[in-house]
Amino acid sequence: MNLDPNKSPAPQEPEPTTGSAPAPVWLFVLVALLAFWGMGFLDSHGGGFDARVYAPYNSAKEVEDEWPKSGAGAAFARGELVYREVARCILCHQPTGLGSPGQQYPPLAKSEWVLAQEPGRVIRIVLNGLQGPITVTGQQFNSNGMVPWRDTLTDQQIADVLTYIRSEWGNNAPEVKPEQVKAIRDKTAGRPGQWLADELLKVLETE
Amino acid sequence: MIATSSSWHTVSPGPRSGSVAPPAEIDASCRVAVMVLLACAAAWLVVASGFGLIASLKFHAPNLLADSPWFTYGRVQPAQVNALIYGFAAQAGLGIALWMIARLGRTLLVQPGYIVVGALLWNVGVKLGVFGILIGDTTGYEWLEMPGYASPILFAAYAIIGIPALLTFHHRREPTLYVSQWFLLAALFWFPWIYSTANLLLVFFPVRGVLQAVVDWWYVNNLNQIWLGFIGLAAIFYFLPKLTARPLYSNYLAILAFSTLALFGGWGGIHSGAPVPAWMPSLSTVFTVLTAIPLIAITINLNRTFTGAIAKLKESLPLKFVVFGAVAYLLAGALAIVSTFPQFSQITHFTLFTPARTQLFLYGFFAMTMFGAIYHVVPLLIQNEWPSARLVRAHFALAMLGLAFYVGSLSVGGILQGLALNDPQVPFAGALNRPLVCFRVGTLGDLLMTAGNVCLALNLAWLLARCCRACCVPAIMAAVKPQMAEAAR
Amino acid sequence: MNHGPLIFLGVFFALALSWFGLVFESQLQLGNAQPTTNLVNAAQLYPQMRPGQARQGLDVYRSLGCAACHSQQIGQTGRTYDVALTDAGTNRSAVVDTLLKVKPDATAIEAQRLLEKPPATILKDVTRAAADAAVAKFEPTGAKVEVRVIPTGPDIARGWGKRRSVAEDFLFDQPAMLGSQRVGPDLADVGSRLPDANLHSLHLYDPQIVVSKSVMPPYRFLFEKRKIGREPSPDALKLAGKFAPEQGCEIVPTDEARQLVAYLLSLRADTAIFETPMTVARANVSTNAPAATNAPAAQTTNSVAK
């Protein structure tokens, strides 16, 4: 480079030009190959473009399958879903299972009705609802009543939600099977209205 | 395209009519505007290097400046990045871009006065932004840390610079487009779009939760790969053929590189372990791998253009910078493709490897290319040679050595760090031991690069001082002399 | 041909593509995300909003740029399965028999011991198929056996979290500072890993108190040195040796320090939600158990938290 500050810079080079050599064909082949690879990669690693799928899972079904399906654990999880989202028992009986004494919703936690070894009475309550006063854990509750779920929930759902409330909040009673629910549903098929607590107490638990 | 009234441009012939403007006139029209941008860029480069040095030293002496919240690492590091990107890279890029658009269009620069105003406003914005980061108003988003009171200033300044640039392009008297013009035109549009989108979705009307990170990663990737990448590539495609006096090997390859880079380059940025659904990192991986195509196209093009011209390297220092930048670009691109695969990124993510790669791209490719361009363009603008060729040579040597130390040591350190972090038996504190030793070499590299940047600033200051003395003093004397004569009488 | 508008359109199209694909599509998918059903703890949705102090702490975290060295994203590379016995039931001999079938290398005495204190892990680190088969074998015996899903990966092995970070974890954070460096450890789950506020305060004051060769700078400016009044303040830091201030002075955290510590304590990512299959070992949960959420840890510690 020129060190003499008084001399003007070197004469200017002309602006660059381009040649017109063709792009090699193999480059286009490579584009196609890479595009093909890319589609395969997205297929196997893209999780089906599902917002719920995170690596290392590859599809929503795989994630779903991971959650327990068999055994009491699965019934518990399904029952929790019924409690919270499907039937929304949570609204009255609360997430803590303590109900609301002020609004006369009885608790499920430590409730002798829930904890009974044979679930006949609670199944009846869920199927046909309840009306009038009821004594739970020594307290009396006189709510407007619990709606019947006979026509809204299936046997499996009722069994699951009862399994759930019988294992949550410190409760520890045996799970409820859908067959038990079906048996009672058939037995009480003709019943018109909600149960009264006194009526229920007359029904033997084993029925 | 844009309706023009005669008050908008001082050149009377319409677009693509009339004779082309001679280069000397074009340079004269660019002189003030481009020099303001380049001089400010050089100044910000030194400032950014200073911040970078402080940040680097804190790794070895954590108590350094520890009592000042302004200089805590978490503020100095973003200050460095923002000063480097928006202070240096943006201004150097815009300055060189303006000159190239004017030269390639064989037309005078439109409304340079506006550009100067825009440049000064841009500097105000960057100063305010960096200050805001240091006092703690940082937004928290990487590479977008400048607070919400600085970014609109930058956006306005960009508009004030960008519109004359577009008009200059529109008024070109050379109808055939050269490759660089494609890249530059694309880059001119790209920045305001991504900058406004990112700021709107992150700072002013924030999106929810992890989407903020997604927008941020999208922005950083587009800023890097597309905006800075296109301006740097435009410069390489311009200066390499020009300084070797050879035609660019293939127009078609260049257009292929342009279109594939534009289509594929914007999708990267989401790394494979990110807390986002699996389809996002997969998309990024696929498209990053696809950027191998433009990389190959550029490699072939530049290689075929350059073969046999190695001798020219000895003659021209700017060419050395530009060739270095080209090689760094290709290397950085290859590393980006390799790093996108989970098997590799599992080792290198969150380690020192990432800043090594960033530095290779930002400094090794973009900054070095801009240095080469600056060293070539400034003497043409000012009609004066660089006062010290030795400083230029020193800059090249320091930059090359510094970058090699920095990138090399941090890459090795990063891989060591990653391997140690992946081994649960190694306690966390222990995982950093060997990388820190590597980082000492990295800090040395930082020092060397800073020294190189200082060489550029000194050289430029010296040149400007000499030039100002040469033309301003006689002008002032000429203006003052009659008054002095008056007073004497 | 006038290339100018052509380039403009092409560029707009290319940019729009990546914007639609990455930004808009993810906004459609995640933009209206709501707190999700927490599948483990029935009492709460996930995530919970951070309480006031922690939210201010997030602002301090942002302002100091902690994300420059700390990441907040735990990764996961795979998963493994355990089989656990939660209830031995009544037919113990059948259960022992099945146990010996499922775990041939165990002796009868070991098997008996497993039944004594459920929950007990019967099989460790097996495939899903093997785990399911084992559970099926136990069905007729009346024992309660479950498959446990355990996420695996280097971050999890290091104890930085029990599962990977997902979008839900950052739902209420503004800004969401995921970080991109691990000069310091990952902080996504630091609230459950290090629930001691005092430790965090000491660490912020001078990291070398806690980690002797720490690279982290001291944040002494987050603390105030003042003369001891009639009695030392309850939240003064207990410093010793070269870190202690001179006689008659004490180091007290400022509001910013308290907020930052509250934020750190609120950083938890140990809740199992749909996207992160994982089994949290269930004790018989009473209603008073602390929730596994992004809320701060139970107030079992220290005088610094307010």
Image (cartoon, grey):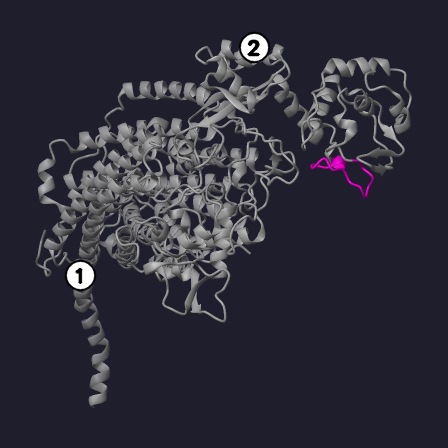
Q: Is residue A171 left or right of residue B98?
A: right
Dot 2: chain letter: C
Query: Horizontal placement of C234 versus B407: left or right?
Result: right
Q: Main secondary structure of the magenta part?
A: loop
Disc 2 marks a residue whose amino acid type is Lys
Residue B119 magenta: no
Comparing B444 with A176, the one in front is A176
- Tag nearer the camera, 1 or 2: 2
Depth check, front residue: A59 or B244: A59
Task: In the rendered structure, find residue B463 and report the number of the disc placed on it.
Answer: 1
The answer to whether the residues at label 1 and label 2 have Cβ atoms under 8 Å apart is no
- Quarter location, residue A39: top left
Asked if residue C57 is positioned above or below residue B309 in the image, the reply reads below
User: On residue C137, which mark appears?
Assistant: 2
Depth order, front residue of C263/C117:
C117
Taking the image as drawn, is residue A86 in sight?
yes
Whether residue B82 is visible to the viewer of this picture, yes or no, is no
Q: Is residue B386 left or right of residue B433?
A: left
Q: Quadrant of residue B126?
A: bottom left
Q: Is residue A151 left or right of residue B30?
A: right
- Report the amino acid beneath label 1: Leu
A100 in the magenta segment: yes
Where does the image place residue C145, in percent across and percent down from the top left? 57, 18
- The secondary structure type at the circle numbered 2 is helix
Q: Name the mark on residue B435.
A: none
- Magenta segment, which residues? A91-106
In percent of width and height, residue C295 lies at 57, 45
Chain of the residue under the numbered disc 1 shown in the image: B
- Tell me what residue is drawn at x 56 percent, y 31 percent: C273
